[in-house]
Image: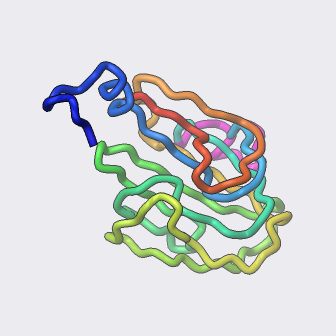
Amino acid sequence: MNFHGGQHSAHDKKTENLRVITSCCLGNVIALEKLSNDAFSSLILGDGFGVIPSANEFVAPISGEVKDVSANSHEITVKTPDNMLIMVSIEPQESACELDISALVASGDTITQGQPLWNVAQPAAELMAAVIVTNSDSLPSFNIRYGKVTSFNQPVMTITV
């Protein structure tokens, strides 16, 4: 809460213009270009990051409204209050493998950062994940922190809006 007599300090204003996206799972955050899925690695869907999971628990990387759950439940798209569109995807490491997953959310649901998104039967070693801002071309700037993620609230992508 701000107690500056209704005025925001320069620090408050700077914080208000930043959005933080966390990882959708624990593991190693890598560049999208390093994923074996051509749609992700080509950045045609937008910019973001990939994750090589170390556990098969998958959560919402940001709060918002679920706009879409793909027919095969591999992708969930979330719209934030400031109109960012975030696609979260789970894919098999080997393209010929089938996933045994079920979405825990549906279109129209309001979700919070850290909320479980899927039930996943596969071991984490067989999976890869991606978090993509599909309208990233409209973002003024963003930074991605690559490396190991050990907690679900650890910031990975910081966006200036």
Q: Residue 128 placed where, x, y %?
A: 74, 57
The magenta segment: 34-45
Position of 38 relative to 116 (above/below)? above
Q: Nearer the viewer, residue 150 or 81?
A: 150
| Quadrant housing the C terminus | top left
Q: Residue 110 placed where, x, y %?
A: 34, 67
Position of 154 relative to 89 (above/below)? above
Position of 51 relative to 97 (above/below)? above
Residue found at x 70% / y 80%? 100
Residue found at x 36% / y 53%? 79
The image quadrant that residue 58 belongs to is bottom right
Farthest residue, direction left: 6
Colour convention of the picture: rainbow
Asked if residue 138 can be seen in this view, the reply is no
Magenta-colored stretch includes residue 35 = yes
Residue found at x 59% / y 73%? 118
Q: Nearer the viewer, residue 129 or 153?
A: 153
The answer to whether residue 66 is left or right of residue 146 is left
Residue found at x 57% / y 48%? 22
Magenta-colored stretch includes residue 94 = no
The answer to whether residue 62 is left or right of residue 110 is right
Q: Residue 37 placed where, x, y %?
A: 72, 50
Farthest residue, direction top: 10
| Quadrant housing the N terminus | top left
